[in-house]
Amino acid sequence: MPARFPLILTPTPLHRLERASVDLGVDLWIKRDDLTGFAMGGNKGRKLEYLLADIIEQKAEAVVTCGAAQSNFVRQLGAACAYVGIECHAVVMGLPFEDAPPAEKGLSDQGGNIRLDEILGVKLRRVPDDTWESLYAQAEDLALALEAEGKRVYRIPVGGSSPLGAYGFFRAANELQGQLSNIDAIFFASSSGSTHTGLLMGLRHNRTRVIGVASDPEPEIAEDFAALGRGLAELLRTPPPNASSYELDFNFVGPGYGIPSAEGNQALEYLARREGIFLDPIYSAKAFACLRARAPEFAGKRVVFWHTGGTPALFA
Ligand SMILES: *Cc1c(COP(=O)(O)O)cnc(C)c1O
């Protein structure tokens, strides 16, 4: 099985949301991956434990990734690289898009995660907003340029979603099962797919429904997720999931990827005011909005909300 480089504090806490359980009519629990104890928390720490072990194994001198300016992954990767003394490069756009730029504005590209990246010494290359394809191409250009300088480069896909990243969440599913049983459904924010893939594979012998709440409006991502599933299945030597086994709810993306939604903002205030817990506006708030809206489907059932972190974006 893949080697692990310890970065985070596990198990992360799991506790009941007493007041929200009453409000929503479900037995509601929260898995606190906002409290991974590393670089201000978040789900990326779980992926990075396996990615970093591989980065070290490959004797890389620089890592190259890309994402949105307010990427939570770039922040956590930057901290992991700082911890082991490896250069971290990230090509970022304020808001990458699929086909056309969105009508509404996203978060600021100042403050929040950007400020933390600067403190960490991440080598950020900011480029004008364009498509995801263009972002990937510019990250590859940078990787090639570093290689031309003689550096050993490790490329990391957006959000750390490689099979090794997904393996981190496969382990997280086991961690949850050690904390609570008879779970009817898990809700979480889903974007680059390794959280979803890992949880789905980790709970595949279980009746628990694994419900990802999409942060991106593109239904085709189910295919990318299935490809990630094949990679993880190869690592685990088990049969892969097919695209149709992914339960993805696209109804809470709002105006688009990286743009807060009205329902998400309401969910964010609700959880803060009822339970004293902060969500982030781009991922976890939209996921919690979905859980709130769909709670009647799970009346009296045991539901876990997996908090994936992202709270530094509140300061963007
Ligand atoms: C990256 C991220 C997600 C999505 O996780 P994926 O594994 O990329 O699907 C959800 N929530 C937050 C806060 C994130 O930073």
Image: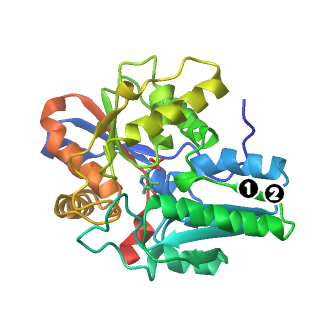
Name the residue located 38 percent from the left edge and 62 percent from the top edge.
97
Secondary structure found at label 2: loop
Please say if 33 is above or below 194: below
| Badge 1 residue CB within 8 Å of ligand 1 | no
In the rendering, at what x and y percent does residue 261 appear?
22, 63
Q: Amino acid at mark 1?
A: Tyr
Q: Is residue 174 above or below residue 5?
A: above
For disc 2, the neighbor class at 10 Å (few under 14, some 14 to 19, many from 20) is some
Task: Give the secondary structure at mark 1.
Answer: strand
Q: Residues within 10 Å of mark 1 (few under 14, many from 20)?
A: many
Q: How is the image coloured?
A: rainbow
Q: Which mark is residue 154?
A: 1
Disc 2 marks which residue?
Answer: 60
**Picture residue at 55% right of the left edge, 17% below the top:** 239
Taking 220 as reference, is 114 left or right? right
**How far from the left and from the top, in percent, is residue 262?**
17, 64
